[in-house]
Every structure is written in C-alpha cells, then in structure tokens.
Image: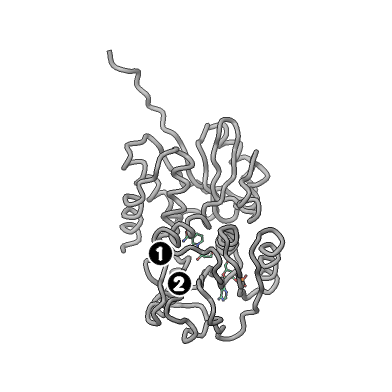
Amino acid sequence: MSANPNYKAELVGVFGHPVAENPTVVMEEAGFQALGLNWRYLTIEVLPEDLAAAMRGMRAFNMKGINLTIPHKVEVLKYLDEVKPDAALMGAVNTVVRIGDKLVGENTDGKGFMRALTQDAKVNPKGKKVLVLGAGGAARSITVELALAGAQQITIVNRSVERGKGLTELINTKTPAKASFAAWQGRYAIQGDTDILVNATSIGLPPLSDEKPEIDYATIRPGMVVCDVIPAPSTPFLKEAQERGAKSVDGLGMLVYQGAIGFKLWTGLEAPVKAMYQALAKAFNI
Ligand code: NDP
C-alpha cells in the first residue's frame, strides 16, 4: 500500500517594501530544488503599517520562517519571542525562524560576510585592524560580527557623523573590540596598518555601478584584504584594490552565504551553496 499523499508545502519568504527586486527567492528555491524539498519561498510586499498583521499571518499560516528587508528589520523585533544576542546588539533582524510556537530573530548579513571572509578568503579577523566605510544596516551587522570574532581595532568612516558615532559607541560599549570614528572628508586616506578594509556603503550599487567610494586608492597596500558588500563578482572599488595587490572579497559571496545560513536555520539541512550561487549568477547574468 502506498503512503498517504502529502500535498502541503512548507512556507518561508520575505516581507519588504519595495520587495519586487529582492533576489533571495532565486537562490532559496534553487536550494530547495537541489535537495528535492517541497518548500516555497514567497516574495511578499508588506507596507510598514501592515507588519503586525503580516507577522500574525505568518504564524497563522504556520510558516517556517521569514526574511525581513527594508523597512522592517528593526520594527519586526516587537513581534518576536526571542532575539539572538548578535541580532539584539545590532538592533536588527533579517531572518525569523519558527521553533515550535516561538519566533526567533537572527541576523545573517554579518554572518554571511564572515563566512566569505574566513572560508573563501581564509582570513581570520582575530587581532586585526579593520576599517569600515559606512555605518548603515550592512555596516552595523558586519562590524558587530567582526568585533565579536575578536577584531582588535575598528575604524568607522561615515558621511553622516551621527550614524558613524552611534555605531562606534555600540562597538565600544557592547563588544570587546575598540572602535574609533573618523569623519569622511575628501579622498579618505586608509591608515597604513589597516589589515581589512570593507566598503559597507551602497556606493557602486546598480544603476550607479561605475561609482566607487571616495578614498585615496594609492593608500591601499599589497596584502590588505579589501571587501565589498555590493552583490557583484567585481566592482570598481575591488578592481582598484586588486590593481594594488590587495586580496579581494566580493559581496556576492556574502549574499549567497547569508541565504545559505537562513536555509540551514529553516530546514535544518546543510545548504547546497553551489546550486544557490549558480542560480543567482544566472539571474544576475554573470
Ligand atoms: P543603509 O541605507 O542602511 O546605509 C547606507 C550607507 O552607505 C550609509 O553609511 C551611508 O552613509 C552610505 N552612503 C550612501 N551613499 C553614500 C555616498 N554617496 N557617500 C558616502 N556614503 C554613502 O543601507 P544598507 O547598509 O542596508 O546597505 C548598504 C549596501 O549593502 C547596499 O548596497 C546593499 O545592497 C548592500 N548589502 C549587501 C548584502 C550582501 O549580502 N551582499 C547584504 C545587505 C546589504 P550615511 O549614513 O551618511 O547616509
């Protein structure tokens, strides 16, 4: 006798506004297919005023989890039963995991960055001097993870002084790392003892993909590790760094890894990273 049929799919997805161009569905669905899982990833437009109803809805639909993107990453904290310590430090959640009846908040952005840095580039940030350009959401998650992983000194360079100082204070008061803020005026010169330089600004994001952060590129020295959050295999920023003998880490790896970490949190299975990367590369025409 054959087993009873099971037509029920497990549901995950993303809430955002605007959300139509969010590419996460491409890699998550590729991952489900590669492992033969009957799971669906739904890209769902949720207005800010509808987030409470949407979170009740995801509980009612028994969804296994949800990603949050602009503008919900901070607001969603109100609707969770538990928030993991690093996400609580950042004050932002991009992945919710349902564990029994509980909704647990995680932040995988900085973890995806860390995996690209440590696994692909084989760089351990422990004891290193880091310079981060930017102080927005991506910079916050990367900086907190670097600090928790033992980075010794973190310099934050940001256009808006208030935002930059806020992140610096967070690192100094809530993590073991030492941070300092430097105002971004003119072509910023990278300190010679910097080990890891990160562009965590949105400069270089399509359609402005020819743009690069205004720094003195002559101050990038061979041996520096230079990372970009822009999800592309290369950017003008990374090209400048490579020309000066620096080791580069692109933002596409970060994007795939943060999705892979979410995949494992939801399904409990090791994510098929290669299949996920290939699907994303195809969607991005790489
Ligand atoms: P936010 O809007 O929170 O922050 C943007 C940051 O960029 C701020 O520090 C802002 O400075 C700075 N910035 C923007 N334009 C300029 C400029 N012209 N000159 C100087 N500084 C500038 O965005 P997010 O942090 O959420 O995202 C930043 C980037 O990270 C995006 O491109 C996003 O695609 C990417 N990202 C990539 C991920 C991945 O997995 N690869 C994951 C998450 C994000 P100020 O504070 O002065 O406004």
| Circle 1 residue | 121
Quadrant of the rendered structure where residue 4 is? top left
Does mark 2 have its CB less than 8 Å from ligand 1? no
| Circle 2 residue | 225
- Give the amino acid type for the residue marked by disc 1 in the picture: Ala
Does mark 1 have its CB less than 8 Å from ligand 1? no
**Residue at the location (40% across, 64% down)?**
121
Residue at the farthest top position: 1
Rendering coords of residue 273 (x, y %)? 36, 50
The quadrant of the rendered image in which ligand 1 is seen is bottom right
- Give the amino acid type for the residue marked by disc 2 in the picture: Val
Check contact, mark 2 vs mark 1: CB within 8 A. Answer: yes
Mark toward the start of the polypeptide (2 vs 1) = 1
Rendering coords of residue 131 (x, y %)? 56, 73
For the residue pair 272 and 118, the one nearer the viewer reads as 118
**Residue at the location (54% across, 53% down)?**
69
Residue at the farthest left position: 1
